[in-house]
Amino acid sequence: MPDPTTKIEGARFIITMDSQRRVIGDGTLVVQGQHIVQVGKAAELAEVQADRVIDARNMVVTPGFCNGHMHISYAHATRGIFPDDLGSAYLPNVFKLQSVMTEDEEYHTSLLAITELLKYGTTTFLDPGSTKFLGRCLDAYRQAGCRIIVGTHVTDRPNTLNLPVSSTANAIKTVEATIQEFDGQLDGRVRAWAMPFAPNVCSEELLVECKRLADHYGSGLTLHYNNGENYVAASIKETGLRPTQYLQKLGVLGENVTLAHMLGLDESEVEVLASTGTRAVVVPTAAVKGGAGMTQSGLLPEMLDAGMTVGLGTDAGNNSNLLETNRAMYLIAVLYKDSRQDSRTVPAETALEMATIQGAEALGLDGEVGSLEPGKKADLVLFDTRSVEWQTLFNPVNNLVYNADGRSVHTVMVDGNIVVEYHKPLFVDEWELIQRVQGIGEDMLARTGLSFPPRWPII
């Protein structure tokens, strides 16, 4: 029996993100099973029959967004509790709260984060190793129908972040077991990577073995790579090298490596990353909220000029406090214009590439997703332009990047399956889930004894 077909007909614009970056006015897209089979002008595809036809007359159709660094498993349960002046105490408190989560609590918290991501147009994302109960959370990934990269973050050095420390041998076993068990699950929608937490909390042996495992299994490796002045100075003192040159010496860089955050670099490090094909994800939402100085010292324009593949992330619901890739896309398009005092810096088109095709490439998935082309997986978003933030509409790329946000996401498809329709997730009772996770957060705070009262009195 042939796979079912869906025809998305007469879209106001289809932003294909193909190699020519075509934007098709009055466009139609046809899906069969998991894949896109036709994209073109509505008149050319008018005679194509389908099992289901979606009237897209007032819609802008885009590829599903890719979020390359998004902790989904713990943050939503205690979202918004941390004051702006918490400083370096932030992460220890995050991981203290996470340490008490049960399997079911993590499942429901993950499902809420995934619901938010999908509802606002993000179809593919990387959770950088913070999920403790992957077996249970696989149920959430199955239920939601998302595309996700997972792993287990490991450390083998003492740290001040409340991260659990393993022996080097056990950490390596954990990484390999995670890849073996989860890579390729859910008909390939789940991929598993090696995820040593960060170079400053991992030994040379652990970093090298994680890269070897990524190579051996045809997988990837990601690291938190946010290098403060103290770590850079320590690296130079201990190794004689800046952190990136140190990773190059270890053989840990390469085309299957994605570094996240990317602060604290100098231009010599950008040259090394570009020459090794190492990929990057920048996280403007977290950087600006945390006062990290991204616009003063960040080198995104230099990374792009060097030909690096760079995607976008949003970090966590209690760090950035937002998950929406659309808003990260806006920030990355405007912040460097201001800091470099040049409105040509990171144009809207580049920001959209970072959220779609470059974001997919940063995750090693550009052969499957990131653009709307025949043969690609049917991961796509329909934005409803019948709302004031979209009007008036002449250049859909500018409107998408600078005007729109997730409120106008009407329909979301992943792997050929509609998971959001008429602005509502189809896989969960959203309000019931919200209330459940609220209770989980209240219970976690009570169990840990943590409390962060608002500055203003609640009476």
Image (spheres, grey):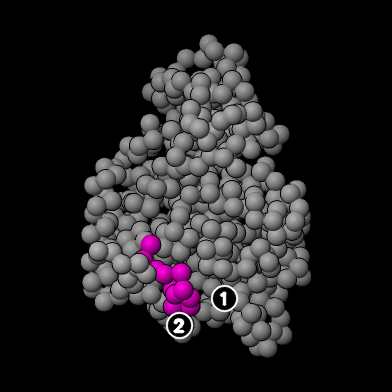
Specify whether residue 61 is in view.
no
Q: Residues within 10 Å of mark 1 (few under 14, many from 20)?
A: many
- The quadrant of the image that shows the C terminus is bottom left
Identify the residue shown where x is 70% and y is 46%: 347
Of tags 2 and 1, which is closer to the observer?
2
The amino acid at mark 1 is Pro
Quarter of the image for residue 37 reads top right
- Reading the image, the residue beneath label 2 is 160
Which comes sooner in the sequence, label 2 or label 1? Answer: 2
Q: Amino acid at mark 2?
A: Thr
Q: Secondary structure at mark 1?
A: helix
**In the rendered image, which residue does mark 1 sit on?**
199
Tell me where residue 98 appears, x and y as whole percent.
Answer: 34, 69
Which region shows up in magenta? Answer: 80-91
**Looking at the figure, which quarter contains the N terminus?**
top left
Q: Where residue 22 sits in the image (x, y, percent)?
A: 67, 31
Residue at 31% in and 40% down: 427
Provide residue 215's location: percent of width, then percent of height.
58, 62
Reply yes or no: does residue 315 show up in magenta.
no
Is 440 on the left or on the right of 248, as rendered? left
Secondary-structure class at tag 2: loop
Mark 2–mark 1 CB contact (< 8 Å): no
Q: Looking at the image, which residue is at 64% across and 58% down?
A: 279
Q: Nearer the viewer, residue 121 or 402?
A: 402
